């Protein structure tokens, strides 16, 4: 990571001289913040574990009710519902395990020049996003204080959806939007990123709304978070 190129960079690597970074930072670049997503938030927000669990619970209830209305005994109804719950527990356990591994393998870094995302489970990759490519950023908060930071890239710049997932905004396949997901201290990270973007753009820090609010597109990197 020797320089801040004008396009997203994806690098495969097996050794990190600095945790979360494939190379030592060049002279003049400083690390402002570094962290990783919470696995519980990743499981809920990116892998939709709660929704899947609710689906299997409803199917189990329906299965038990069907057996009971067909003349089956209470034991048979409970057994049918329990079997469906057991079937549903397997994919849920897989998704929870994947969320834990994805969170453990991810490191988000913010420097005074760029955002670096080291992501991946089996094959870690580093995604380099210079501030010049960040057209806007938005903070999505949750009631528990955690949240996501959505990054909208300027112009025709695109990051790889396959390389990013699940660290990207849902349903943005043609224009993937990187996300710093499930940040336990989302507000503090937003402030760090906002000040860094404002300093890089030589503009005052201005607050922004949620991830679905209109974006300021007048200048790459101009929108920041207070």
Image: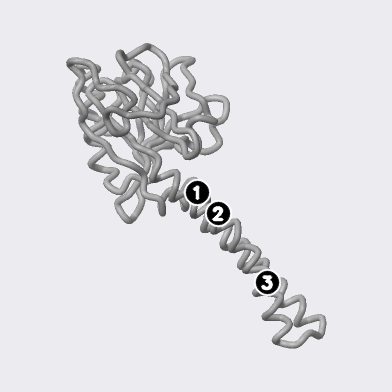
- 168 is higher (above) or lower (below) than 152: below
Where is residue 30? Give x, y as percent.
19, 24
Mark 2 and mark 3: span between their CA atoms?
18 Å
Between 159 and 137, the residue placed more toward the observer is 159
At x 50% / y 30%, what residue is drawn?
A: 163
Query: Element under label 1?
Result: helix
Between 2 and 161, the residue placed more toward the observer is 2
Q: Does the residue at mark 2 contact the one at mark 1 (Cβ under 8 Å)?
A: yes
Residue at mark 1: 98
Where is residue 165? Give x, y as percent.
50, 36
Residue at mark 3: 83
Left-right relation of 60 to 138: right
Mark 1 and mark 3: span between their CA atoms?
23 Å
Left-right relation of 43 to 38: right
Q: Quadrant of residue 203?
A: top left
Q: Quadrant of residue 56?
A: bottom right
Residue at mark 2: 94
Tell me which label, 1 or 3, sits earlier in the chain.
3
- 150 is higher (above) or lower (below) than 114: below
């Amino acid at each position: 990571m020797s320089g801040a190129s004008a396009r997203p960079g994806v690098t495969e690597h097996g050794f990190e001289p600095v945790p979360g970074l494939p190379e030592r930072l060049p002279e003049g670049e400083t690390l402002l913040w570094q962290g990783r997503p919470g696995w519980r938030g990743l499981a809920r927000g990116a892998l939709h574990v709660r929704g899947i669990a609710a689906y299997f619970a409803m199917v189990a209830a329906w299965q038990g009710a069907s057996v009971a209305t067909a003349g089956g005994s209470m034991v048979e109804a409970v057994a049918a519902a329990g079997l469906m719950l057991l079937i549903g527990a397997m994919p849920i356990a897989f998704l929870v395990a994947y969320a834990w591994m994805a969170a453990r393998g991810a490191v988000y870094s913010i420097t005074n020049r760029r955002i670096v995302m080291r992501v991946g489970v089996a094959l870690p990759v580093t995604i380099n996003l210079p501030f010049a490519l960040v057209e806007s950023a938005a903070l999505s908060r949750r009631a528990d204080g955690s949240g996501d930071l959505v990054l909208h890239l300027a112009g025709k710049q695109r990051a790889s959806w396959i390389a990013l997932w699940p660290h990207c905004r849902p349903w943005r396949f043609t224009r993937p939007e990187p996300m710093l997901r499930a940040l336990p201290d989302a507000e503090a990270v937003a402030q760090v990123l906002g000040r860094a973007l404002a300093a890089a753009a030589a503009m005052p820090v201005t607050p922004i709304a949620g991830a679905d609010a209109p974006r300021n597109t007048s200048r790459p990197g101009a929108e920041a978070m207070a």
